[in-house]
Amino acid sequence: MNLNRMWRRYDRLLGADVASDINQELRFHIEAKAESLMAQGWAEDEARKEAERQFGNLGALQGEGERIGNRIERRKRLREYWSDVLQDTRYGFRKLAKSPGFASFAILTLALGIGLCSVIFAFLNGALAPLPAVPEPERLAIMQAPIPYPWFKTYQGDGEAAWKAAAFMSPAPFNVSFEGEGSERVTGILVSPEYFETLAVHPQLGRFFNTRSEREGSAPVVVVTERFWRTRLHSDPHAVGRRLRINGSVVPILGVCPRGFFGTGTGSLSVPDLFIPVTSNAAIAPELRDNVLHRNTQPAFWLLLRLKPGTTIATAEAQLDAETRHLQTRPQQKGKLAHLMPDGTVMPLPPEARAILYIFYGALVLAVLGLICANLGGLMLARGAARFKEIAIRLSIGANRFRLVRQLITESAVLAILGGFAGLATAILIFRLLRTVQGDSNPLLDVLISGPDFKVALFTFAISGLVAIGFGLIPAIVVTGLDTADVMKAGLFNGLRGHRRFGIRNLFVVGQVMAAMTLVLIAGFIVIGAQTGSKVDPGFDSAPISFFSVDPTRDGLTGPECAEALRRIPERLARLGGVESVSLADGPPVSKSTPDTKVSVPSIGDRSVAFQRVGPNFLTTVGAAILRGTDFEDRTLLMDDGSGKVLPIAINQVAATDLFQSEDPLGRRIQVGEQAYQVAAVVRYLPRTILGGHAVPVVLAPLTLNDLQQSDIEGTTVVIRAYTPVGIAAINSELAAIDPRITIFHPQTMPEYLSEQDRLASMITASYTPIGVFGLILACLGLAGVTAQTVQRRQKEIGIRIALGARRMDALRLVMGEGIAMVLSGAVLGFLVASGLARILAAISAPMAQVIGPAASAPGLTLGIPSFFVLLAAIACYVPARHAATINPLIALREE
Amino acid sequence: MDATKLEFLRGTLDVLILKSCVWGPLHGYAITSFIRQQSDDALLLEEGTLYPALWRLESKGLLQSDWGLSENNRKAKFYRLTAKGRRQLQQETTTWHTYAAAVSKVLAAEQPNRPLAEEIR
């Protein structure tokens, strides 16, 4: 058989031409047939015709042949491609197995970096997940600001064609007791009867509210969540109809929500377990008092809309806007009056907030990825340099450059994919840990930290791919762009022509130092800021102080009963053994730490202060020293609403400087809304911001009868000063003597309370320290790697220098000098980037500003972190650089 | 019965083509000649059937084609049996022999002693 290989080569050169192949094949057959017919004595023309006739439809045959041929060709190309990929992958694995140190370092780096990005993405993914147990959540929208109930009625009536509407109030505490047991505070929300219908949720047990049964003023009923039913009612199948005592009223359970349902979000992390119709008589909740359903001036309701098909957020907004203009009594305002946002996600976010969130976390992810890429890219380049000769040989014997680049990238892709798996595992581990800590306490958090799902996995591998290209491509191109003759001639390590001060390798190092510096500084600012804040000094000795809260209106007491009970509590408790002093306040001592109340000071202007209302003896009870003036407390105010009077206040030193500058504050007047106050004392009382720990200007005003009759969400705090601990039982029996309905909640000692604030700081420390340490370690390792490689590469040069009489110190200085120059330039750039980022962070979020503020402005810190960083970097540089000094010129030069 | 009108039983064409290539690569024309000669002109393979069958076998990976030169020095496409094709051929041959033997046996049967219908009863 005479097979000619030449045809195959020819075939490969031009690529296969299926059509002409088929044509030639069939032509050959026809000719062979014709020849054989001619041999039997046919005339040439006849023979040819006969041969063709036997084929039947030649065109159709040709067509079929091309179809099959193309399929074969396609399959062949694909097989070749995959076999190349497989070969590269196998080669990549073999190379990595040969340097397990490099491989494990790279995978660890990738695991941490990619894991960090996955965690960030998984959080965002959780926050933007669709509401659980609600059908078609994407059609839900909520108005961004609360409205009065009558407005809701108008919107509901006028917009029937465009939406179904419901209204609900913000989550509030309810005092709930189960047949005979003591009461607990449970979060619940008051909803309009259309609430469940609008959400299109159906009960697991019993029924939900409807407009026919739930009429205004009817007896209260309650719907509970599945979680409440499971944990508090022990999954009682006959729970419907059971009675709970809620805020003093007996309330039958009407229905149980489906599993996972927690209403819709308002952006708050607290989620309800109880749903009570707003139409219930007002005794059920203080929020319903004062005829709130009929007042146009109390914007206490969130408007929830389920948009009908064909209605978009924009059209709904326009319609609401027009209606709002009619509703508003004030002269026509300009601009949009109604702002809607989608409410179908776990954390509803207005589009602008979503954009900021994306930008901030996007930048963080990019910084981390950039750092990994720079680090691993540098290392890959160093490894590539060690393989110069191998690559040069392969290039010079005709290896395809593109194929070589692909092979080198396959190596980084193998690493990145392994790193992606490790990163995903890290993220899963972190979320598993979070879930263990969280337990079963909050269904919203459950969704938020449900952890990596399919989308997160996809994201993880997408960024792994990006990283693979990021740290693989540039080194691959540099390495394969070698001048082969040069490398072969010059020997192993002088592949890159000459030594460039601003070569790509050095840029990698500078970029890496910069990214690491940025991460370390930002993390440092936040951690140090949080630490500073945690050392809270309230301005008085916290040891003997403890407190608890009561909320008699939610225990079913009327306003006057409530005021009477609160007046008597301090008197009765003061009689207990060991108790020195008892007082009331509208929150724990130094808990009011946000300057959110506007006061106007005559001839100075408006200032913001924290505002706390306290009862008689408060200063004595907490032990706050009076620096100037006299005790301002007035016992008679507890019986009096104080209207029309100028009330005495105490302020702290911070407020004294803030409000009156250098003038004497005593006797000065200030105005808060309608109420006038006069400064009676300056005291040492220092609430601090939770993050950052700045002392806050505070005004202590007396509690009045009005305050005692109303009830805010936190209830009223009873503060006790006692050197021997007072038992809860003793307190309970005293309270029972006043009114058996009163229950206490949140009992705590002052030191406990302060250390809780520490816990927040340590949480922040725990989450940001790893980021900083991660950056630091990466930068040092990368630097050490690159320096080691520089020493190796310049071995011959250094050898010659030493042979010519350079001292060993000079060799060391040569290598170190370059390293330090790179570190310094990277550090300066990183410092600039970090300062800029800190400013952006502070602008985006107020708590961040509080944290970053003090750290970023303290010169000790801003200099301390970079110095420490540069020192570490110098050490990382020095360790491999030492080798430069030990180079033996004989050995170094013999290599040739 | 007219020998030239013998139809190929379904499936037998493939195995005959595979068999033709068992001793080495052949081009399409040589395969038709081989089958015709070996069957003493009883089996006549039409070109319109042969080529699609060849291409299908190639696409299944049972045959592999290469360009080569024919006996009179013309460029022709040669089909070679792959390892997979060889295995397939062995299998099909065995199946065919078993089948043919069984069919022959039944066709050569003589009348049983008792009528079949009785045995069933």
Image (cartoon, rainbow, N blue to C red):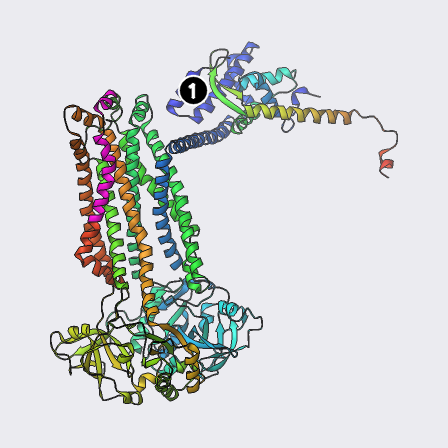
Q: In the drawing, does residue A243 fall left or right of residue A368?
A: right
Viewer-side residue, A572 vs A122: A572
Judging from the image, what secondary structure is the residue with disc 1 in? Answer: helix
Q: Which residue is mark 1?
A: A8
- Figure check: A861 above or below B29: below
- Judge the density around disc 1: few (<14), some (14-19), many (≥20) Cα neighbours within 10 Å: some
Chain letter of the residue carrying label 1? A
- For image coordinates 32% across by 21% down, the residue present is A397
Rendered location of residue A847, percent (x, y): 27, 63
Depicted A174 relative to depicted A566: above or below: above
- Residue A834 seen from this side: yes
Q: Name the quadrant containing residue A826.
A: top left
Q: Nearer the viewer, residue B76 or A508?
A: A508
Check the picture and name the quadrant holding the C terminus of chain A: top left
Q: Quadrant of residue A559?
A: bottom left
At label 1, the amino acid type is Arg
Q: Position of residue B20 (x, y in %)?
A: 59, 19
Examine the residues drawn in magenta and state their main secondary structure: helix
Q: Residue at position x 49%, y 67% from top?
A: A227
Is residue A162 in view? no
Q: Is residue A783 above or below residue B27?
A: below
Residue at 40% in and 57% down: A126
Q: In the image shown, does A217 or A470 lie closer to the viewer?
A: A470
Magenta highlight on residue A682 = no
Residue A822 horizontal side relative to residue A465, left or right: left
Q: Position of residue A385 (x, y in %)?
A: 28, 30
Residue A844 at x, y percent in the picture = 25, 60
The boundaries of the magenta stretch are: A867-896
Q: Is residue A885 magenta?
A: yes
